[in-house]
Image: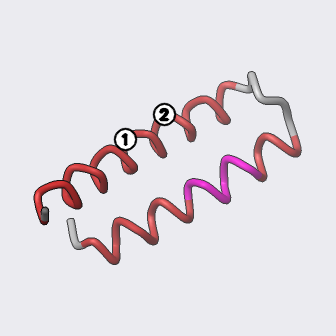
């Protein structure tokens, strides 16, 4: 995945998680699912960046 696309996905999921948490609860299933997806994207980004070093 292209880094720019990955960063856009990260930002989208971050905003989605914040919105969902604000309108439901932190323990809402959709908030948790979005948080897990965000974690996966952040891990992928970290792996790409660590290979550049």
Q: Position of residue 40 (x, y in %)?
A: 37, 41
State the SS at label 1: helix
Residue that appears at 19% across and 54% down: 50
Figure check: 44 above or below 27: below
Figure check: 4 above or below 29: below
Q: Quadrant of the N terminus?
A: bottom left
Q: Position of residue 31 (x, y in %)?
A: 67, 35
State the SS at label 2: helix
**The magenta stretch spans which residues?**
13-18
Figure check: 49 above or below 31: below
Instruction: Label the magenta part by its dominant secondary structure.
Output: helix
Residue that extends furthest to the right in the rendered view of this protein: 23
Pointer 1 with pointer 2, Cβ within 8 A: yes
The numbered disc on residue 36 is 2
Q: Quadrant of the C terminus?
A: bottom left
Badge 2 density bin: few <14, some 14–19, many ≥20, Cα 10 Å: some
Q: Is residue 5 magenta?
A: no
Residue that appears at 19% across and 58% down: 48
Q: In the displayed structure, does residue 45 sit left or right of residue 30?
A: left
Q: Which residue is nearer to you in this view: 33 or 6?
A: 6
Q: Quadrant of residue 6?
A: bottom left
Q: Position of residue 7 (x, y in %)?
A: 41, 68
Q: Is residue 16 magenta?
A: yes
Badge 1 density bin: few <14, some 14–19, many ≥20, Cα 10 Å: few
Q: In the displayed structure, does residue 32 sit left or right of residue 53?
A: right
Q: In the displayed structure, does residue 17 sit left or right of residue 51?
A: right
Q: Which residue is nearer to you in this view: 24 or 50?
A: 50
Q: In the displayed structure, does residue 38 sit left or right of residue 6?
A: right
- Report the residue marked by disc 1: 40
């Amino acid at each position: 995945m292209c880094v720019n696309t990955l960063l856009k996905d990260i930002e989208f999921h971050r905003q989605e998680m914040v919105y969902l948490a604000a309108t439901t609860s932190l323990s809402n299933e959709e908030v948790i699912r979005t948080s897990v997806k965000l974690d996966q994207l952040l891990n992928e980004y970290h792996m790409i960046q660590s290979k550049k070093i």
